[in-house]
Amino acid sequence: MAVVHKIGRRKTAVARVYVSEGNGTVTVNKKDLNTYFPTATLQYKVLQPLNMTENTSNYDVKVNVYGGGITGQAEAVRMAIARAMCEIDIENRAILKPEGLLTRDPRMVERKKFGQKKARKRFQFSKR
């Protein structure tokens, strides 16, 4: 099997994932998964597609991720791994699709408008 390369995005985070056959090591930005994503929730999110397709110990995953915050990065990595699992075996799509792991979340930060303090918040109004 050749190396499978996929991209996942969430908010402003972009994750590039390289999946190859191996023993289940996950490396994020040249660090171990547990050091880059310290909380158990984020680690669960990243490994969710591998756990659902029962491929936790079958593939090595190398990730380059940048932009956004830690949660957005974890969800971007999750999406990229899910896409890679679908390319490896098309039957994985039926498992991952109902869970929403292949759907790009379109929600982004709304831009700040001129004449206002933030995107929707106005400057204080004084009648007199």
Image (cartoon, rainbow, N blue to C red):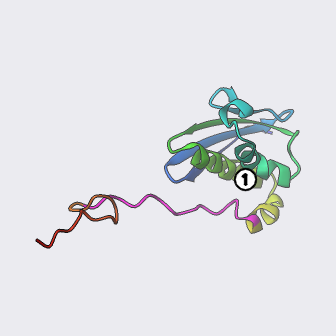
- Residue at screen point 14% across, 73% down: 127
Image location of residue 67, percent across then percent down: 50, 42
Q: In the orientation shown, which residue stands out farthest toward the bottom?
A: 127
- Residue at screen point 68% across, 37% down: 37
Is residue 15 shown left or right of residue 84?
left
Observer able to see residue 2: no
Observer able to see residue 26: yes
Badge 1 crowding class, 10 Å Cα cut-off, few under 14, some 14 to 19, many 20 or more, is many
Image location of residue 83, percent across then percent down: 70, 53
Q: In the orientation shown, which residue stands out farthest toward the top?
A: 30
Where is 32 relative to 69, above or below? above
Asked if residue 101 is among those painted magenta in the image, a careful observer would answer yes
Give the total number of marks visible in the rendering: 1
Is residue 67 shown left or right of residue 54?
left
**Is residue 41 or residue 86 the one in the foreground?**
41
Which residue lies under the disc numbered 1? 82
Image location of residue 11, percent across then percent down: 51, 54
- Residue at screen point 25% across, 62% down: 116
Give the residues drawn in magenta, as a range.
Answer: 99-113
Picture quarter containing residue 128? bottom left
Q: Mark 1: which secondary structure?
A: helix
Is residue 63 shown left or right of residue 59?
left
**Is residue 48 or residue 21 the one in the foreground?**
48
The residue type indicated by label 1 comes to Ala
